[in-house]
Image (tube, helix red, strand yellow):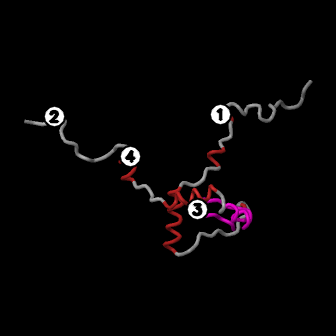
């Protein structure tokens, strides 16, 4: 009379939000300001960004694209990536000036300017 365990079919709960895999959390690319900080640090120390051999990373961590923050399997895959639209777009974004805290506050409307009184005194 049914001694086996009961389990749902694979993907049976895939449309229920709380059971969905949150891949956007895991595979999210680095932000441009994080990459700009890495590039600045490597320029200050005059050392390129290099990784020791690691079996957990693609290609052992030897083929790394600094601009996009991704690891690749081989030198050919890295060269193909550097011809892609995504790489060129990211390079264009990295050439722009970084936002400062003052600019962020200004954009949010948190300015410190003094406005003239609405009704002039006589």
Magenta part of the chain: 59-81
Residue 111 among those drawn in magenta? no
Q: Position of residue 18 (x, y in %)?
A: 65, 33
Side of 98 relative to 17 (left or right): left
Lower position in the chain sequence, tag 4 or tag 1: 1
Residue shown at the point (35%, 43%) measured from the top left: 109
- Which quadrant would the C terminus be assigned to in this image? top left
Q: Residue at x 58, y 56 (%)?
A: 89
Q: Which residue is mark 3?
A: 67
Q: Earlier in the sequence, mark 2 or mark 3?
A: 3
- Crowding at dot 2, Cα within 10 Å, few <14 / some 14-19 / many 20+, comes out as few
Disc 1 target residue = 18
Cα separation between marks 1 and 3: 34 Å
Looking at the image, residue 45 sits to the left or right of residue 21; the answer is: left
**Under tag 3, what secondary structure?**
loop
Query: Upstream in the sequence, badge 2 or badge 1?
Result: 1
Q: Nearer the viewer, mark 1 or mark 3?
A: 3
Q: Mark 1 and mark 2 in contact (Cβ < 8 Å)?
A: no
Instruction: Name above or below for residue 53 compared with residue 12.
Output: below
Earlier sequence position, callout 3 versus callout 4: 3
Q: Secondary structure at mark 2?
A: loop
Instruction: Quote the CA–CA distance across marks 4 and 2.
Output: 27 Å
Task: Give the residue pinned by disc 2.
Answer: 119
Question: Which residue position holds label 4?
Answer: 107
Position of 7 relative to 31 (above/below)? above
The residues tagged by marks 2 and 1 sit, at their Cα atoms, a distance apart of 55 Å
Label 4: which secondary element: helix
């Amino acid at each position: 009379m049914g001694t086996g365990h009961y389990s749902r079919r694979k993907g049976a709960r895939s449309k229920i939000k709380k059971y969905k895999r949150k891949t956007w959390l895991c595979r999210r690319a680095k932000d441009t300001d994080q990459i700009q900080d890495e590039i600045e640090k490597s320029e200050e120390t005059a050392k390129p960004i290099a990784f020791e051999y690691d079996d957990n990373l693609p290609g052992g961590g030897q083929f790394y694209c600094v601009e996009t923050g991704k690891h690749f399997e081989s030198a050919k895959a890295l060269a193909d990536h550097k011809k892609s639209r995504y790489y060129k777009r990211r390079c264009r974004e990295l050439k722009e000036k970084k936002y400062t805290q003052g600019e962020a506050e200004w954009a949010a409307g948190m300015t410190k300017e003094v406005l003239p009184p609405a009704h002039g005194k006589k």
